[in-house]
Amino acid sequence: MTTDSGNWDWSRLTPVLPQYILEQIAPVPPPQTCYGPDTVPQRIRTFLWVTLHQRHLTNAERFRRHLAQSALCPICYLEDEDLDHILRRCLPARNLWNRVVPSDRLAIFLNLPLVTWLRDNLLHRQLNSSFMDGWDCQFAVFCWLLWKDRCTTIFDSESAPTEDILTRGLRLA
């Protein structure tokens, strides 16, 4: 549904979609093919959608809903477990990002607002896209693996070392 120049093909969209849908599509950038085909598995794309909408049931959210005794992270017990903590500040995430992101870019990488950080990395706008081909896919896989490892640690009492997360992430991306 895009033109050869990469813009929305309004001549094909207008006859089949109501005006209010067209107005919702207009501000959204069309999909780009210059980065190659989308190789991220559907389960990871779904995870990213839920993450961008901040709908994961973290301990902070469970505590807010009176479903948990504490909002603290059950892995490190250092701060409340929200998405930002799971994906950037908890020890497994810190260890991973310290291994993957160049040290001169780490401060910027870790301090953007969460949604900005996610979108910038997924849309190739983050500084990191210049040091690694396919950064958007690798970033998506790493985030999903951090979440998956968090769930495995909590529900199965098993935790993967950073090296395993890194190896699986590079293999999957």
Image (cartoon, grey):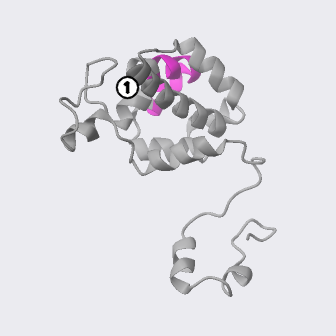
x, y (%) of residue 53? 42, 51
| Residue depicted at 47% across the width and 31% down the height | 147
x, y (%) of residue 168? 64, 22
Label 1 element class: helix
Instruction: Say if 52 sits above or below 25 in the image.
Output: above
Instruction: Say if 78 sits above or below 116 in the image.
Output: above
Quadrant in the rendering for residue 81:
top left
Q: For the magenta stretch, what is the residue range?
A: 93-109
Do we see residue 124 in this rendering? Answer: no
x, y (%) of residue 112? 41, 39
Residue with the mark numbered 1: 89
- In the shown orientation, is residue 21 left or right of residue 30? left
- In the shown orientation, is residue 1 left or right of residue 77? right
Magenta segment: does it hold 141?
Answer: no
Magenta segment: does it hold 98?
Answer: yes
Do we see residue 24 in this rendering? Answer: yes
| Residue depicted at 43% across the width and 27% down the height | 151
Q: Quadrant of the C terminus?
A: top right
User: Which of 142/42 is in front?
Assistant: 42
Instruction: Say if 28 sits above or below 76 in the image.
Output: below
